[in-house]
Image: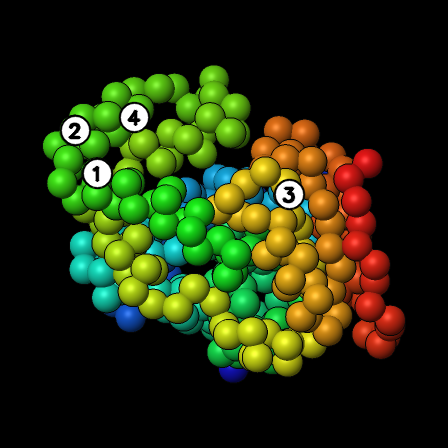
Amino acid sequence: MARDTASLPAVPPAAVRRIITPMSHFTHQGQRIAYTEHGSGKKACVLLPGLLTSQRMHEGLARSLADEGAYVITMDPLGHGESDKPVEMWHYSMRAYAQEVIGLLDHLEIESAVVGGASLGANTTLEVASAAPERLKGMILEMPVLESALLGCAMAFTPLMCAQTFAAPLMRASGRIAGLVPRRFVPLVGEIALDWIEQDPEPGSAVLQGLFFGRVAPPREERRTFEHPSLIIGHPRDPVHPFSDAGLLNRELKNSQLLRANSVLELRSRPERLTGEIKQFVDQCWAPRKRAAKPRAVSAA
């Protein structure tokens, strides 16, 4: 039977810094899914990476939240990072990724958690809200991809999908070169770029094809029914993650706040401001629930 993480004792920040477990795996529908636990305590939070990146994308944020007493789990969805990478496209969809998150909560015996992520991770979170709303304490939705992103996604990812499919030997050679770069000397933004280059093109293409074939997110009519506390993070000048999608989602959700980032890189390169807002949001999600008026949008400093 699943345990309620609210019954677990909070761990002082000094102790939390020492509780970072090695990467682990669980099996979901015959596939291995990789995850890492950071910290301990009652405030469970699951962080999901962007498309074709790994859980390292959120390592800094996870450690910062753990330092404040949160129990943070970063996860590699199927086809990403250290998780299994089947080459059949039917393995991959936003709704399938949501089921992996629910499977992770079941595996760790977590009754409910704040769930969030960037891009693909944000859309997966919306699908968790659709499939199992009772498992969510709140949602962190960085760079959601909705209706306004359709053209930008097609322009950005169709050439990549074609290259992975028809120029696989060249892509593998590039990946081998990227694998020679010592990661300890590379900043986080560089690691994310290396993840893209280093991946095996065959499962990478299958991921893209599976996502293109399925729905991107729950439909607008369903999104309007979601009542979970939600922190939406958008940024300007990005056709794949247009700020208009973040603004649209903020208007649709009943209990959301909109945070404007300075750029797509801010949370990875200068994370202090956004990390502070996320910490505060996670604390609010785990505080005794009070029904409040919808917050106003928060602009960049």
Closer-to-camera residue (12/78): 78
Which image quarter is the C terminus in? Answer: top right
The answer to which quarter of the image holds residue 195 is top left
Image location of residue 102, percent across then percent down: 47, 71
- Disc 3 to disc 2, how far (Cα)? 33 Å
The residue lying at 15 percent from left, 37 percent from top is 168
Circles 3 and 1, Cβ within 8 Å, touching? The answer is: no
From the viewer's perspective, is the residue at label 3 or at label 4 nearer? Answer: 3
> Tag 4 or tag 2, which sits nearer the N-term?
2
Q: Which residue is mark 4?
A: 179
State which mark lies toward you, 1 or 4: 1
Q: Does 277 sit left or right of 136 as displayed?
A: right
Q: Nearer the viewer, mark 2 or mark 4?
A: 2
Checking the image for residue 170, the label placed there is 2
Q: Which label sits in the foreground, 2 or 1?
A: 1
Q: Position of residue 113 (x, y in %)?
A: 62, 66
Please tell me the numbered disc located at residue 235.
Answer: 3
Q: CA distance from mark 1 to mark 4?
A: 19 Å
Residue type at mark 2: give it.
Answer: Leu
Q: CA distance from mark 3 to mark 4?
A: 30 Å
Mark 1, residue position: 163
Question: Can residue 8 be seen here?
Answer: no
